[in-house]
Image (tube, coloured by chain):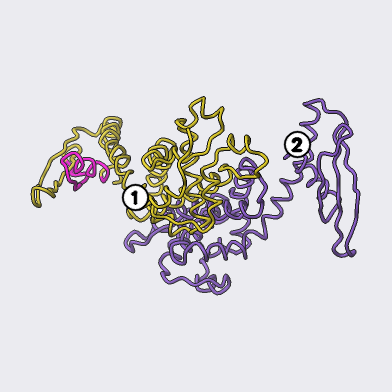
Chain colours: A yellow, B purple
Amino acid sequence: MNSLPLSQLCSKLEVTFSDLTLLKAAFTHSSFRNEHKREHMKDNERLEFLGDAVLELCVSQYLFQALPDAPEGELTRMRSTIVCESSLVAAARNLDFPRYLRLGKGEELSGGRERPSLVADVFEAFIGALFLDQGLHVVEQFMTRHFYPRIEIVGERLHRDYKTMLQEYVQKQNLGVLMYDIIAERGPAHDREFVAQVMVGGTLWGEGVGHSKKEAEQNAARKALHR
Amino acid sequence: MNSLPLSQLCSKLEVTFSDLTLLKAAFTHSSFRNEHKREHMKDNERLEFLGDAVLELCVSQYLFQALPDAPEGELTRMRSTIVCESSLVAAARNLDFPRYLRLGKGEELSGGRERPSLVADVFEAFIGALFLDQGLHVVEQFMTRHFYPRIEIVGERLHRDYKTMLQEYVQKQNLGVLMYDIIAERGPAHDREFVAQVMVGGTLWGEGVGHSKKEAEQNAARKALHR
């Protein structure tokens, strides 16, 4: 399989590179470089090292600002869920990154273009190249357009855990009955909002708002856990 | 012990903060906040989360640019040696950070002001606050002035390992005699430079330059290892 031209990727992503060798390196696997030793090209391993740190910072700042009341432990937990191989692979595939990758013949034959670790590395390397060439601000814009909208799913999964966590806590500490109540519904039909309360042993422990009953309950459970 | 005023720290470090509450939070331990709950102040835990990622990126970029030929594995190893508790503590103490920290009474009595983990956290939190208030570029300037000049010591320790690593490799692979030679000395007495060669089994494996014979040999060993 021949890789697609990077100029096409740039126009699709609406990003520009001053130094195209950086972009080229980000999409060059070491197996391809090894097959073209005479050309002295660079592969994406060092860019991946840098991009990993850039991603970590971007997501940290995003969470820091999106969740102004979340304690440090929660931020750390969410960051490691968001900056994980599977979410990087999903983002890279969504942008067709694997099709632009220059891969050695052996790697190609053994399915390297589909291998998650390899695909995640390309995403990190691209972020590293974009950071070097255009700075942190442009990386943030890229993430806002192509990455953060996708992590809501991850956030949802995390929230789903709060009810379980609260239940486990209440049972362990023998605190009595755990009860959720939807105490209000408001707003127009297309933008409905629900307010949930969670009671533990007859006492109000938390209140939460959400666009579904489930989400409202999850937020109430989260508040209760932070109590 | 009363903490020193932060205005003094700012003028000493030649940094300015637009939002002084960020700086204040960076130097507020949770134990102090717990003792002043009515005042709704912030502590440094969330800033430490952010600062940790800022530091990681700064040091990654520094290494990426300082060592243009180092493979990814070496960059990763060096980064984890540099961004470790002991180096953060050393940098924080060198800048008198512990004296500006607001600490709860219990923590103060149990020696919290000297505790390495706590001191390292203050350094990270300060970096986080500086990043939020002044951006990555100002953090880089701060690091260049107050952090990177100190890591040469760490670098030196790392380099010292190359000779050991090469020796282990040569023995393991049964490659024969390992020999170092100083093949040249040059420059004036106050800025003397040495050139070392390392031979393995009679073949030249690497050449290195340094301001001491030892450093030149270490660099030669590093080159040999990269071969």
As for residue A31 lying within the magenta part, the answer is no
User: In front here: B83 or B6?
Assistant: B83
Q: Amino acid at mark 1?
A: Ala
Q: Is residue B39 above or below residue B180?
A: below
> In this orientation, which residue lies closer to the viewer: B45 or A102?
A102
Q: Is residue A93 above or below residue A57?
A: above
Dot label at residue B165: 2
State which chain disc 2 sits on: B
Count of marks, rendered view: 2
Please state if B91 lies on the left or on the right of A216 as rendered. right
Give the quadrant of the C terminus of chain B. Answer: top right
Residue A70: numbered disc = 1
Mark seen at residue A174: none
Image x and y of residue B205, in percent: 82, 39
The structure residue drawn at horizontal position 33% and vertical position 61%, both measured from the top left corner, is B40
Q: Are marks 1 and 2 in contact (CB under 8 Å)?
A: no
Answer yes or no: are tags 1 and 2 on the same subunit: no
Of A79 and A20, the residue lying toward us: A20
Magenta-highlighted residues:
A203-223
Q: Amino acid at mark 2?
A: Met
Under tag 1, what secondary structure? loop
Which residue is drawn at the image coordinates 56% and 60% (left, top)? Answer: B98
Q: Residues within 10 Å of mark 2 (few under 14, many from 20)?
A: few
Asked if residue B103 lies left or right of residue A149, the reply is right
Q: Is residue A210 a member of the stretch shown in magenta?
A: yes
Q: Residue at x 53, y 63 (%)?
A: B139
